[in-house]
Each structure stands twice: as C-alpha cells, then as structure tokens.
Amino acid sequence: MPKSTIFEYKGDAQTVTWDRRLCIHVGECGRAKGDLFETGRDPWCDPNLSNQDRVAEIVARCPTGALAVKDASGTLQTEPVPARNEIHVSNDGPLYVSGDLTVDGASSDMHSVERRAALCRCGASKNKPFCDNSHREINFQDAGAVGDTGLPEIESNGPLTIKRIPNGPLEVSGNFTLRAGSGRDAWSGRKAYLCRCGQSANKPFCDGAHKDAGFKAD
C-alpha cells in the first residue's frame, strides 16, 4: 500500500493536518512561540496546548500549504483570502505564492494551496509544480532580483491562476505583485510567464531558455 502523505494531529476542538508532499521544513511552525509544535515531542503537534485562534494563526504562517486545520466535526476550516495576491521570489529558493489561488497540478486534497504554495523555480523538483528542496541539492543560486516594474497601478486581489505550460514556464494570470528576494515590492501586473527551468537569464521571468536546456515537465 502507498505510504500516507497526510497526517492528522487531533485535539478536543481542532485537528491539525500535515501534508508531507508539500512540506519543505521552513520552520514557521516549529519556531512559533508556545507549545502547539515542538520538535522531538511525540506527537510533535498538540492542538490542545494552544487556543483555537492561535492554532489557526500559526498554521496560516506555513508558506507551502502543508498545514491545515479541521474543526471538532472534522470539517476543514476555510482560511480567509489574503488581502492581496503576492509572489515572493525567494533567495536561492522557490516562488512563495499567496492569495486567492488556483494552482494547476495540485491534488484535490491539497486544500491549503488555495491560499499559499511554494513553487519550484530551479527546475529540479521531483514534485513539480511544487518545491521539494531540490534547489539545495543542485546548488541553485539566484538572489531574487527583479529588474522590471510592470504596471504602475493595479488592483491587488481577485482570483490568481497559475498554469503549467508543458516543458515551459508558469503562466500566472490575475492581479498580483512580485516581491524581490530582498523583500521589495518590485513588479505589479496581471499576467506573467515565470521561469521554472532555472535557466532564464531574466529570472524570475521566462526568456525561452527552457527550449535550449531541453526542460521537460508537465
């Protein structure tokens, strides 16, 4: 039988779920103050050790969508839509996306990627379109600088669709802002093609380098 990918940590009022397919161990949960998560403890997550609002707030910090919360009846708690759609081009790492998301390639049980996800931009992930930390193995290096500025003024919310172009970039459609690796709001627009082969000379944007690189991905 295939190994389970989603683990549940039950409390009296809430259950926290953890999806190992999406987790890249950023540590936002483990470093949060309080006793909800504690590395080395069994179980490492105990919802009874934190109040309900605090549980939801800490879970929502996870930038990959690996964590979610269910109420006492087992119903998934719907997270509020973020105030704006945003893509952070992280230093030597993935694209951290947050907003009102539809991510092409997400499984139906990856509930939290409707709000937040970490998407591969090095080209090496075995879990595309999601990051699996392969950028570390291949020593991917890009500090996340963004040269273009896009449109001067746009709305910042609404649906954001991320589509995989076969053997090519990610097509992002909807209102969104790109944040540079430095944290700067760098670009705003309604459509962009973002590199996911790791070879573009104009990262985070696609420049067609995937063709010469022979990049293959759904």
Image (cartoon, rainbow, N blue to C red):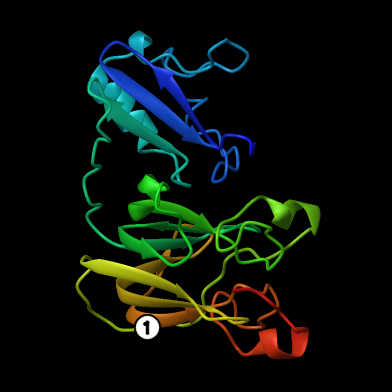
Q: Residue 149, can we see it?
A: no
| Frontmost residue, 3 versus 144 | 3
Q: Residue at x 30, y 62 (%)?
A: 85
Q: Secondary structure at mark 1?
A: loop
Residue 101 image offset from top left, x and y in percent = 33, 61
Location of the C terminus (image quadrant): bottom right
Q: Is residue 78 left or right of residue 125?
A: left
Residue 74 image offset from top left, x and y in percent = 28, 27
What's the residue type where badge 1 is placed? Gly
Q: Residue at x 39, y 53 (%)?
A: 108
Q: Is residue 79 above or below residue 128?
A: above
Q: Is residue 190 left or right of residue 45?
A: left
Count of marks, rendered view: 1
Q: Which residue is most to the right?
A: 138
Q: Is residue 34 above or below residue 58?
A: above
Q: Residue 62, can we see it?
A: yes
Q: Is residue 191 left or right of residue 144?
A: left
Q: Quadrant of residue 158?
A: bottom left
| Disc 1: which residue | 150
Q: Which residue is most to the front?
A: 1
